[in-house]
Image (cartoon, grey):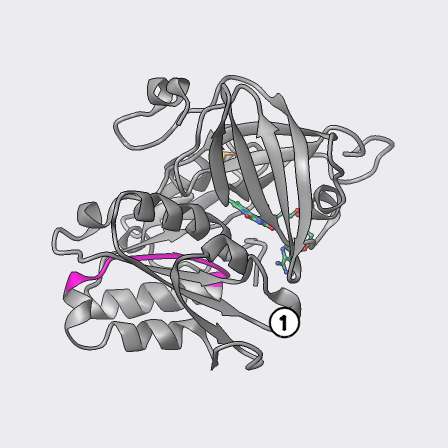
């Protein structure tokens, strides 16, 4: 990890973003199943913490002449390695609209405008559950992105982790290379890989018996999957963190576009109070306007 990262890591685990937007340079853009992995050098940025995200925009061909997208888009960092005085960052993208479409076609050497790292990262398993024997990671579709860097962080610290990854069908699957060296179980709704059905079927089985008392669950995926994970964990008293999505216009607390209702009343801004939240902070993980299904 570069030296400057320690200077900006706060007590809550966040790495704070340098002021303003900076230019990264794309070093790779590879297909990965139905997704793409875009990697860029961030020459002066700090190393992010797992669960944090960046607001991204292509330097060229982004808006202009009345064309969408106007605003940058939010992406979880999926992999980060130290690179000289900066970082090399990988993002897993699903092309669903003008922003992801433009990012998916970026070529080596093109500029990628970055703001980040932003938001609250994952907590260690023992912080969630003092009895935790390790971590159970549950990912759905493109939601496996933040779990990939979390898996590596845990492995680097010698903390046991098991990953359960689910996909709708083959066209909406990818990123498995980011989980090399991990114990992975797969589920797919169309049966093309692993268990035919939902990834939450695998979680339910894993939480049967004694393992619930020593579990700490981390999930990211479509709202319906996150809600199923939240309910499963609540019923079994298993502490869980959810990396959630909501529509984000700024990414740093200014626009209130990402407000999510809290169980205790009031709202949180998911970009600054999340995107990783404790599952018991919300009544439901079904967030209106969240992109992925
Ligand atoms: C914290 C955070 C982290 C994120 N991390 C990632 C990530 O790692 N990788 C990633 O690809 N995306 C990620 N997203 C989602 C991404 O920011 C949005 O999907 C973004 O709006 C896409 O921009 P766009 O211009 O391509 O499409 P938009 O113009 O924003 O959306 C186009 C239309 O497609 C719909 N849509 C969006 N996603 C889907 C989908 N999956 N399937 C079907 N319809 C959809 C939208 O509701 C909208 O109607 C993240 C979002 C947040 C808030
Ligand atoms: S995205 Fe603007 S306040 Fe959260």
Q: Is residue 33 left or right of residue 245?
A: right
Instruction: Look at the numbered disc 1 and say if its residue's Cβ is closer than 8 Å to ligand 1.
Output: no
Query: Residue drawn at (30%, 70%), measured in percent from left and top?
Result: 232
Q: Residue furthest front?
A: 181
Q: Is residue 255 visible?
A: no
Q: Is residue 206 visible?
A: yes
Instruction: Give residue 252's position: percent from left, percent from top.
Output: 49, 29
Q: Residue furthest right?
A: 65
Query: Viewer-proximal residue, 222 or 139?
Result: 139
Query: Residue drawn at (87%, 32%), measured in percent from left and top?
Result: 65
Q: Is residue 290 left or right of residue 277?
A: right
Residue 107 within the magenta-colored segment of the rendering: no
Instruction: Give residue 135's position: percent from left, percent from top.
Output: 28, 56
Query: Residue drawn at (30%, 25%), measured in percent from left and top?
Result: 10
Query: Measured along the vertical axis of the image, is residue 138 above or below residue 281?
Result: below
Instruction: Give residue 224's position: percent from left, percent from top.
Output: 47, 66
Q: Quadrant of residue 250?
A: top right
Q: Quadrant of the N terminus?
A: top left
Q: Residue furthest left?
A: 131
SS category of the residue bearing label 1: helix
Q: Is residue 246 left or right of residue 170?
A: left
- Tally of marks: 1
Q: Quadrant of residue 58?
A: top right
Q: Quadrant of the C terminus?
A: bottom right
Magenta region, residue range: 214-223
Residue 217 within the magenta-colored segment of the rendering: yes
Instruction: Give residue 157's position: percent from left, percent from top.
Output: 27, 43
Query: Viewer-proximal residue, 179 or 97?
Result: 179
Question: What residue is disc 1 on?
Answer: 170
């Amino acid at each position: 990890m570069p030296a400057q990262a320690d200077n900006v890591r706060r007590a809550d685990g966040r790495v704070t973003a340098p002021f303003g937007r900076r230019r990264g340079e794309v070093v790779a853009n590879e297909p990965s199943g139905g997704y793409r992995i875009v990697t860029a050098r961030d020459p002066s940025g700090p190393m992010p913490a797992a669960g944090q995200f960046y607001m991204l925009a292509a330097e060229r061909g982004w808006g202009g002449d009345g064309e969408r997208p106007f605003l940058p888009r939010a992406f979880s960092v999926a992999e980060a390695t130290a690179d000289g005085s900066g970082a090399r960052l990988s993002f897993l993208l699903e092309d669903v609209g003008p922003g992801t479409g433009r990012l998916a076609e970026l070529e080596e050497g093109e500029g990628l405008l970055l703001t980040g790292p932003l938001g609250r990262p994952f907590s260690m398993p023992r912080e969630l559950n003092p009895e935790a024997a390790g971590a159970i990671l549950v990912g759905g579709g493109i939601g496996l992105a933040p779990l990939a860097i979390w898996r590596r962080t845990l492995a680097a610290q010698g903390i046991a982790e098991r990953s359960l990854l689910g996909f709708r069908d083959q066209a909406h699957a990818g990123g498995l290379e980011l989980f090399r060296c991990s114990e992975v179980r797969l589920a797919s709704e169309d049966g093309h890989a692993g268990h035919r059905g939902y990834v939450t079927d695998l979680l339910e089985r894993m939480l049967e018996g004694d393992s619930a008392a020593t579990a700490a669950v981390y999930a990211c995926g479509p709202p319906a999957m996150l809600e199923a994970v939240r309910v499963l964990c609540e019923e079994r008293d298993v502490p869980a963190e959810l990396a959630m999505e909501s529509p984000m216009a700024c990414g740093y607390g200014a626009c209130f576009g990402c407000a999510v209702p809290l169980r205790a009343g009031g709202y949180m801004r998911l970009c600054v109070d999340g995107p990783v939240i404790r599952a018991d902070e919300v009544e439901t993980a079904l967030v209106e306007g969240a992109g992925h299904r």
